[in-house]
Amino acid sequence: MLGYRFGSGGTRISLIGGCHADEPVGPRFLRRLVAFLAGLSTDHALLEGREWWVVPQANPDGESRNRSWQKGDPDLYDLPAYLEHVVRELPGDDMEFGFPRGPNDHDARPEPRAIRRWWGRAPGPFSLHASLHGMAFAGGAWFLVDSGWVDRIRPLEVRLRRKAVEVGLPLHDVERRGEKGFVRLGPGFATRPDSRAMRSHFAALGDLDTAGRFRPSSMETIRSLGGDPLTLVSELPLFLTPGVGEDLGPPDPLAERWKERVSGWRTALLAEMDPDGIRREAVEKGLRAVPVPTQMDLQWELIRAGLALVEGKAEPS
């Protein structure tokens, strides 16, 4: 697991990817960003007055377990390959909600513990943290923001909505009524999840074992280091499910129907159905893969918009 630091200055930016094993685009983007930043001169505008702390892949073992459906880093992921080979951790076992509760929490997984120690070397608090995530199936792009910044994010919302239109990706919309910390702010936006709300959710279901597994997230950990950092999460779909969000529910009836279709395709693959038949049916139903470059464009725009917000600028350099 690699961490990279570039630049110096009072604006400290933390970026992390791969916290869920089956979300490859964040790590792919951050590796490109690291290569780009490494080639800049020290007086470049992106580095001037800024420190970049980047962990492209927080979950190398999870990435390895999912390589079979990601061979060649394609621009479009293949639906049957994904359905047949995807591996995702159970709730509470992922890296995102696995950061140590304190210095003596030796039962936390080693990867988040190492990242937390590294962040602790920073000479001051962070200004911005973005955790790049993805969704397998969704109605479009979804962005999660720090609840403490809700009254200040209007410029960020405007920029991201404009960018989504530019790249031709709808906005995901869902009403979860605060479940797990998700409070709907409008199409494409909600507050980010919270470990305490996660624990409460699973405890209310009677699943105390899962509830007990949740530790602080990367966002909560960054905020615990001081200051008032803006923490953001990108949630971009690998596959677009049209119609989701037109009826928010809950539950969203079209989202439920898409879940049933996807489950049926997965069952058919296990029964050795021809993958080409599933590809044709998916196209007929309107499901399509979201190009990886499109997802990366939106991830970068989220970071740029967040940077502009914390620096108090109309546009970042």
Image (cartoon, rainbow, N blue to C red):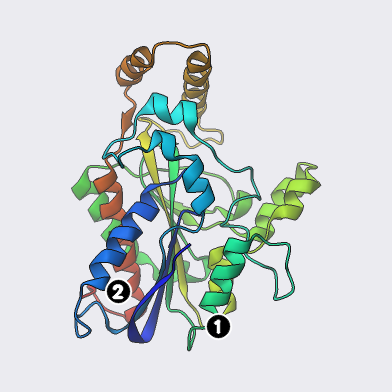
Neighbour class for label 1 at 10 Å: few (<14), some, many (≥20)?
few
Q: Quadrant of residue 306?
A: bottom left
Q: Which residue is pictured at 38% across the width and 41% down the height?
A: 237
Which residue is at the front of the view, 99 or 300? 99
User: From the image, which quarter does the C terminus lie in?
Assistant: bottom left
Which mark, residue 5? Answer: none
Q: Amino acid at mark 1?
A: Gly
Which mark, residue 308? Answer: 2
93 versus 45 height, above or below: above
Residue 194 in the image, given as x and y percentages of width and height:
61, 59
- Labels 2 and 1 touching (C-beta < 8 A): no
Judging from the image, what secondary structure is the residue with disc 2 in? helix
Q: Which residue is pictured at 35% across the width and 45% down the height?
A: 171
In this image, 242 relative to 180: left or right?
A: left
Mark 1 lies on residue = 226
Q: Amino acid at mark 2?
A: Ala
Q: Which residue is pictured at 37% across the width and 34% down the height?
A: 239
**Residue 110 in view, yes or no:** yes
150 versus 118 height, above or below: above
Which residue is at the front of the view, 247 or 65? 65
Which residue is at the front of the view, 281 or 82? 82
Judging from the image, what secondary structure is the residue with disc 1 in? loop
Q: Which residue is pictured at 40% across the width and 34% down the height?
A: 69
Residue 99 in the image, given as x and y percentages of width and height:
62, 64
Residue 16 in the image, given as x and y percentages of width and height:
44, 62
Q: CA distance from mark 2 to mark 1?
A: 20 Å
Which callout, 2 or 1, points at the residue further toward the start of the chain? 1
In this image, 28 relative to 213: left or right?
A: left
118 versus 194 height, above or below: below
**Residue 161 in view, yes or no:** no
Neighbour class for label 2 at 10 Å: few (<14), some, many (≥20)?
some
